[in-house]
Amino acid sequence: MCPVIPSGRICIVASVHQVKSFLNHTAYLSCYFPNSQKTDIKDLRIFWQKGDGEVVHEVYYGQEKHDNLSPKYINRTKMDMDKWTLQLLNAGIVDEGQYTCIIQHRDKGSPKVIHTSECVLHIIANYSQPEIAWLHTGELKSKKYLNLSCSSSGGYPEPKQMAWLISHENTTRGLAPHMDISQDAVTKLYNVTSKLNITVPTNTLTNISCLLFLGGQLGSLVSVPLGIEIQGEEMEQVKINFFGPLIAVILLITFLVGFVILKKRNTLSTNQSVSLAV
C-alpha cells in the first residue's frame, strides 16, 4: 500500500509488524527506525497514518503538530523519540488496522522520505472463564439424556472453537458441536455458547469439561470440571437381588434360633412341673 503524505503519494517497500494490545490499554507502535546517521530530530518530519491517509500523529521538525490530526486521535497519542515509538492511549477495537510510520529528512530543499514501516494493530479482550450450566430440571436418571451448556463472554477477537472433553475410567473423548456466537453492537465484544446432549453416563465417575480455543498464540480457556456419578438401574437391581435373599436368610436363622430357645424353655418348664408332682 502506498501511504499518502501532503507532498504527494509515495511507494516504498516497508516491513509489516504485528502488534497486539489489550483493550483499553496503551498500544505501542514502533517506527523501527535505526537512525544510523544520528540525524537530529529537528531535521526530521515524522508522522503516523492509519489506512489510506488518516493522520494519527505528527512531529514537525522537532515540534508536535495537531493541525492535520484525525479528531478521534487528538490527545490520545504520544511519541517516544528515544525509542521511535508511538503510544496510542486507551486503544479500542475501532483502532484495529494498519498503521504506517513515515520519516522525512529536510535536506537542501524539499523533504525526502528516508524511512517507512508498517504495523498491524490487533486488539485483545479477555474472555470470561467458560462456565457449564444445566439445561434441564428434575432428577437425573440413567439411560436419559444429559443437557448442558457452556458459555463465555466479553472477549475479542472471535474465538476459533468451543469443545467438550468427556473423561471416564481411562478414556477421554472430545466433541465439538456447533458454537453460537453473538457480538455486541456497541462494545463489539463476543459472547459464545455451546450445547451438549449425551446419554447420562452410569456406573462410573465421569468428568466433563468445556474448552474455548482462542487461536494463534492466545491459547485456550477451560471450565471447572463437572463430575457425575450415577448408579444405573442394573446396578440397583443387583443390589436388590443380593441383599433381598441375604435378609431372608438372616430372618430365617433368627426365627429358628428363637424357636429352639422357646422349645428348650417349654421343655424345661414341663420337667419342672413333673418333678413337683412327684
Image (cartoon, grey):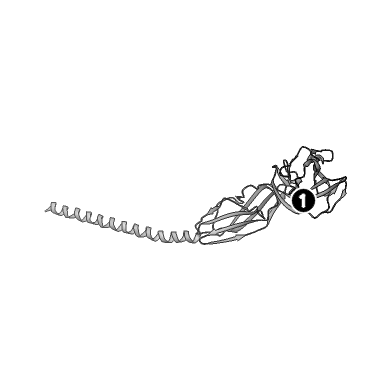
Residue 75: horizontal and vertical position, in percent? 77, 37
Residue lying at 47% horizontally and 60% vertically, measured from the top left:
235
Q: Nearer the viewer, residue 42 or 91?
A: 42
Q: Nearer the viewer, residue 45 or 240?
A: 45
Residue at disc 1, secondary structure: strand
Q: Quadrant of residue 217?
A: bottom right
Residue 252: horizontal and vertical position, in percent? 33, 59
Residue most extreme to the left: 278
Q: In the shown orientation, is residue 204 left or right of residue 273? A: right
Q: Quadrant of residue 174?
A: bottom right
The N terminus - image quarter: bottom right
Residue under pointer 1: 117
Residue 184 seen? no
Residue 207: horizontal and vertical position, in percent? 54, 55
Q: Nearer the viewer, residue 86 or 175?
A: 86
Residue 241: horizontal and vertical position, in percent? 43, 61
Q: Amino acid at mark 1?
A: Ser
The number of discs equals 1
Residue 42 seen? yes
Q: In the shown orientation, is residue 166 left or right of residue 109? A: left
Q: Residues within 10 Å of mark 1 (few under 14, many from 20)?
A: many
> Image height check: is 15 above or below 154?
below
Q: Nearer the viewer, residue 114 or 23?
A: 114
